[in-house]
Amino acid sequence: MQLSSLLRLFSLAAIWGSSFLFMRIAVESLGPAALMTGRVLFAALFLALMGVLLKQALHWREHWKHYFVLGFFNSALPFLLFAIAAQTLTASVLSVLNATAPIWGALIGILWFRQKVSWTVLLGLVLGISGVAILVGFDPVLLKPGALLAVVAAAAAAFCYGIATHYTKNAKKVPAFANAHGSMWASSLMLAPVIWAYPVQGELSLGVAAAVLALGVLCSGVAYLLFFRLVEEEGATSALTVTFLIPVFGVFWGHLFLAEQVGWHTILGVLTVIFGTALVTGFKPSVFQRVKMLN
């Protein structure tokens, strides 16, 4: 991977890892629905501006059904579930549960699409589930009321990403930028009515407003542009290695800004989930690939 691409990869991981920090900052004041409606709306406005500058057409009339399906499973529902979970769980736990998305995708492929599975994928599934059990099972956050439901909500959000992955593989081909742009507008339309169920709970302070803006523009809009550039330069497989780095930054930001505790279970759980995800996705470091070639 080129140095410029490597810098984009780490920047993307740092940005997406920070999204759980911003959720924790703003969710108590705004509530899950208003927070995530603001996120997707700011992202949609930012991508609309970039679409004009980059001359990227949306073709809404042609692809609106696709944008709504993709927006529901890839943004609206998982964002809302993560925001609900963020009312209880730490940024560290949220980021690790988010990293299980490829594992859920593999399980969907095996159980629903009857895809053949190798022993390495099975080992990765076991490790991924074990890593979550280690992280969550020994975390004091489970002592909080409603913690188990919050874990289920965050795991369900990652499960949604697994569904979205399989959907995009079989859906009609739409340019990546249009997918991001259109799905953000569709998500905005779907999430806005949910505010009635989760009304704003507190005052909109400057810090909360900044967190919402960061979630929309930085963690969604800018992050999508970085991701698409990575896919273009290095390919989808290399770009998806960002999945392994997000929990590292999620734990780091939570500890740095929210004083979240990092115990042995945190480190062991993160490493186990990352290794399990790597096996499930078929990721192999270049050093192992060279050894295989020599043999």
Image (cartoon, grey):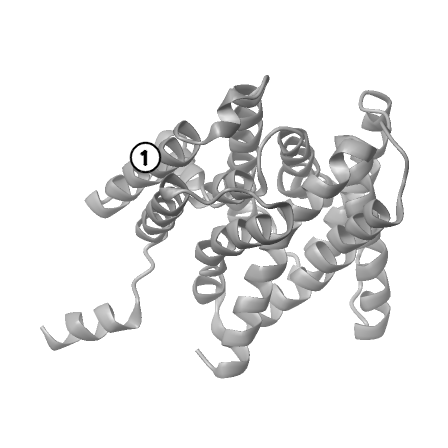
Determine whether 135 is above or below 279 in the image: above
Residue extending furthest bottom? 3
Residue extending furthest top? 145
Q: Where residue 286 sits in the image (x, y, percent)?
A: 29, 72
Task: State the residue at coordinates (48%, 43%).
Answer: 96
Q: Quadrant of the C terminus?
A: bottom left
Task: State the residue at coordinates (65%, 47%).
Answer: 21
Check disc 1 and report the residue beneath it.
130
Observer-nearest of 13 and 262: 262
Q: Where residue 45 sits in the image (x, y, percent)?
A: 86, 56
What secondary structure is found at the residue carrying circle 1?
A: helix
Q: Where residue 189 sits in the image (x, y, percent)?
A: 83, 37
Amino acid on which the number 1 mark rests in the picture: Ser
- Asked if residue 62 shows in the view, the reply is no
| Residue 291 lies in quadrant | bottom left
Task: State the residue at coordinates (37%, 31%).
Answer: 133
Determine whether 238 is above or below 116 in the image: below
* Structural crowding at the residue carrying mark 1, measured as other residues with C-alpha within 10 Å and reported as few (<14), some (14–19) or many (≥20): some
Task: State the residue at coordinates (55%, 49%).
Answer: 255
